[in-house]
């Protein structure tokens, strides 16, 4: 009995060590439930990622449907085929480049993943671990790995076919590995995990919709057929859940790929639209700057959107005009209503509005400025209508003047220059004080302010002329010539290059004595010190530049030619010379008339007083005054005879003053 008990115990020992079938079933079922739950979570997450931008995805689908309908209509001949815009072609090229870059990145990532998987696979084969893959799956795996390697070696594949071909090859191999004739049910479950890894990664490459949809359907049908056709495991349940997860994952992958492409297209379109708006905005500013005094930007309500310091300087103000309505700067209510109607008028066809209006503005000196206001509307980056307004002055009235007849704007276009030919019959001149350093501006005509630019009083005219030294020498010579010759003498011309707020200009300048400022009609003494001259500007040619630059910022270096040690300005020519005393010192303007033959100065005359002329005829316009006793008088001129003439003809215009 004891031997029988030992044999029964020995026989029952191995039986107890074997696991029971119900325990194996519970473990396998738990494992499969974990796999099904993971697949479901991945599918739900993919769908949620798609639903986050559901509106954008619907808009893209609506665009696809409209495009398909348009293609059908064009194929049937019911609607003319419209050419694609240039921006769409640029977007397609950029999207193709992005697809190739993403696919190359995915291929490198998959190569590293498959390399690690291959190392683990070979290690398991070496230790004789049971395998669930079939030989056909092994061949497909080798081909897939070879395709990944060839992708890294080949760089000459066309971009338009690379993404679709590569995606099709990988998805075809996955479909073969999941096919019923290539794997068992257990292997199919493992391949489902591989496809769950590949599909979202490949979807980021966003191939064409037809290719992506076709191969997603192939992989889904292959995996579902394998799960349905093979006999189910004894402990496995819920194969329908696996099928639903695979279908949902494929649809989510398609949606993710389309969403990525739609997002890329929207981003590129926004970038290109911003570039177009900036280029159009810059071109509009450049165009208006070419013939306007001031250019400002207005919002949709007609308010100034920037500080507009140029406009403030144009109106002689020193404050920012941001937020101020452009209509508040207009004088009359009639002009305000006209400007409001122009700004509020909708554009035809949704494009830009280009218009011009003539209005009147008032500056801080109570001068009414007659201006032309050009404005161009455009769509800003925030899809709001904005205006670029250019203001050009073409007349100045007094504080109580009435409006006259407006003359329309006339511009003559040229390939290189823009010639301003308005009011050619009117005088364009500026009165300067030639007895002061730098030729400060005393006054100017309204036409000068319109065509050349408005200048503050006492501003040195030398700051606006490029050829400073030559221009100053010419003015000196012409003043000597004017004071010696008769009034019928022809004025030589000076071709000057100017730097103004409007840009660079060229003009022909002539000089005349300012009778109102230099001397009175009855020959009395001048009421204001200094000698004034009128500089007439003709044949003004305007060379537009990029933007407006204040001429005061470009101070002419030629002012140093006046001399830092000598504060007296000397004018001389072959016939005469005159000097201005030190500003603020005693004495009047010294004018010496010399004949063609001069005697050398005496030994003591270089630092002393000069000898006055012996005789001055009664035809001279100014009185002869006594020489100043100040020791700061200038020495006589070099290179000529210092002895003054003994007689001056009656035709001389200038006064003989000591």
Image (spheres, rainbow, N blue to C red):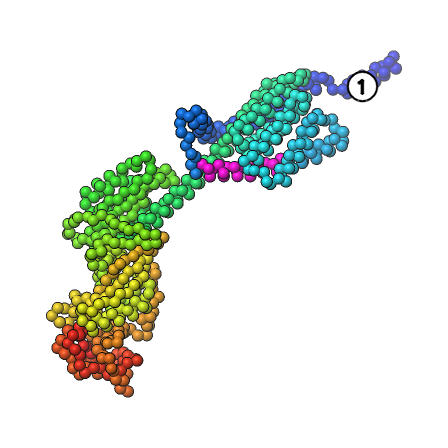
Q: Position of residue 511 (x, y in %)?
A: 23, 66
Which residue is most to the front? 77
Range shown magenta: 88-112
Foreground pick, 367 / 477: 477
Give the quarter of the figure containing the C terminus: bottom left
The answer to whether residue 443 is left or right of residue 234 is: left
Is 90 magenta? The answer is: yes
Q: Position of residue 385 (x, y in %)?
A: 33, 39
The answer to whether residue 528 is left or right of residue 254 is: left
Up the image or down, 325 lies above or below 34; here it is below
Q: Position of residue 402 (x, y in %)?
A: 15, 49
Is 265 magenta? The answer is: no
Which residue is most to the bottom? 603
The answer to whether residue 120 is left or right of residue 269 is: right
Does any portion of residue 491 appear in the rendered image?
yes
Q: Quadrant of residue 652?
A: bottom left
Give the quarter of the figure containing the N terminus: top right
Q: Which residue is mark 1?
A: 13
Q: Residue at x 52, y 27 (%)?
A: 47
Up the image or down, 209 lies above or below 621; here it is above
Up the image or down, 36 lies above or below 655; here it is above
Q: Quadrant of residue 612?
A: bottom left
Does any portion of residue 436 appear in the rendered image?
no
Q: Neighbour class for label 1 at 10 Å: few (<14), some, many (≥20)? A: few
State the SS at label 1. Answer: helix
């Amino acid at each position: 009995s004891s031997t029988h008990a030992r044999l029964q115990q020995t026989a029952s020992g191995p039986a107890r060590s074997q696991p029971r079938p119900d325990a194996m079933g519970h473990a396998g079922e738990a494992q499969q439930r974990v796999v099904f739950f993971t697949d479901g979570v991945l599918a739900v997450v993919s769908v949620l990622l798609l639903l986050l931008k559901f509106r954008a995805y619907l808009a893209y689908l609506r665009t696809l449907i409209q495009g398909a309908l348009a293609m059908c209509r064009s194929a049937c001949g019911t609607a003319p085929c419209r050419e694609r815009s240039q921006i769409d072609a640029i977007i397609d090229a950029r999207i193709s480049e992005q697809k190739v870059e993403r696919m190359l990145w995915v291929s490198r990532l998959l190569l590293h993943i498959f390399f690690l998987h291959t190392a683990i696979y070979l290690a398991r084969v070496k230790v004789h671990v049971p395998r669930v893959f079939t030989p056909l799956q092994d061949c497909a795996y080798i081909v897939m790995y070879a395709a990944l390697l060839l992708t890294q070696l080949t760089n000459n594949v066309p971009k338009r076919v690379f993404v679709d071909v590569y995606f099709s090859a990988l998805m075809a191999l996955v479909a073969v590995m999941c096919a019923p004739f290539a794997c068992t049910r257990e292997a199919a479950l493992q391949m489902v995990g591989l496809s769950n890894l590949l599909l979202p990664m490949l979807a980021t490459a966003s191939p064409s919709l037809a290719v992506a949809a076709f191969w997603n359907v192939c992989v889904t049908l292959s995996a579902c057929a394998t799960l349905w056709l093979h006999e189910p495991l004894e402990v496995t349940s819920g194969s329908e859940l696996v099928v639903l997860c695979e279908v949902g994952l494929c649809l989510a992958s398609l949606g993710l790929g389309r969403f990525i492409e739609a997002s890329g297209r929207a981003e590129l379109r926004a970038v290109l639209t911003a570039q177009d708006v900036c280029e159009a905005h810059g071109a509009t500013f450049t165009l208006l700057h070419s013939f306007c005094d001031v250019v400002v930007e207005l919002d949709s309500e007609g308010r100034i959107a920037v500080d507009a310091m140029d406009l403030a300087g144009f109106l002689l103000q020193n404050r920012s005009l941001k937020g101020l309505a452009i209509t508040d700067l207009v004088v009359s209510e009639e002009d305000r209503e006209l400007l409001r109607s122009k700004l509020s008028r909708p554009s035809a066809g949704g494009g830009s509005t280009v218009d011009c209006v003539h209005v009147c503005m008032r500056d801080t000196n109570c001068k009414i400025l007659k201006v032309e206001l050009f404005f161009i509307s455009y769509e800003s980056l925030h899809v709001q209508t904005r205006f670029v307004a250019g203001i050009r002055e073409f007349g100045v009235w007094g504080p109580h003047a009435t409006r006259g007849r407006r003359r329309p704007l006339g511009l003559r276009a040229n390939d290189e220059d823009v010639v301003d030919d308005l009011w050619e019959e009117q005088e364009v001149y500026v009165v300067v004080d030639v007895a002061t350093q730098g030729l400060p501006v005393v006054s100017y005509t309204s036409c000068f302010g319109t065509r050349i630019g408005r200048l503050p009083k006492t501003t040195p005219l030398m700051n606006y002329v490029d050829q400073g030294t030559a221009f100053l020498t010419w003015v000196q010579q012409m003043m000597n010539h004017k004071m010696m010759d008769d009034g019928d003498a022809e004025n030589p011309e000076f071709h000057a290059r100017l730097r103004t707020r409007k840009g660079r200009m060229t003009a022909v300048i002539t000089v005349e004595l300012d009778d109102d400022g230099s001397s009175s009609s009855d020959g009395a003494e001048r009421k204001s010190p200094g000698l004034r001259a009128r500089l007439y500007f003709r044949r003004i040619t305007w060379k537009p530049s990029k933007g407006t630059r204040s001429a005061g910022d470009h101070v002419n270096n030629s002012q140093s030619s006046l001399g830092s040690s000598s504060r007296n300005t000397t004018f001389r020519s072959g016939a005469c010379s005159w000097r201005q005393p030190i500003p603020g010192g005693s004495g009047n303007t010294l004018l010496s008339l010399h004949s063609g033959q001069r005697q050398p100065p005496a030994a003591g005359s270089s630092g002393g007083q000069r000898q006055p002329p012996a005789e001055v005829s009664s035809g001279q316009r100014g009185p002869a005054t006594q020489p100043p006793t100040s020791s700061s008088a200038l020495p006589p001129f070099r290179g000529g005879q210092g002895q003054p003439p003994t007689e001056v003809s009656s035709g001389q215009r200038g006064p003989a003053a000591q």
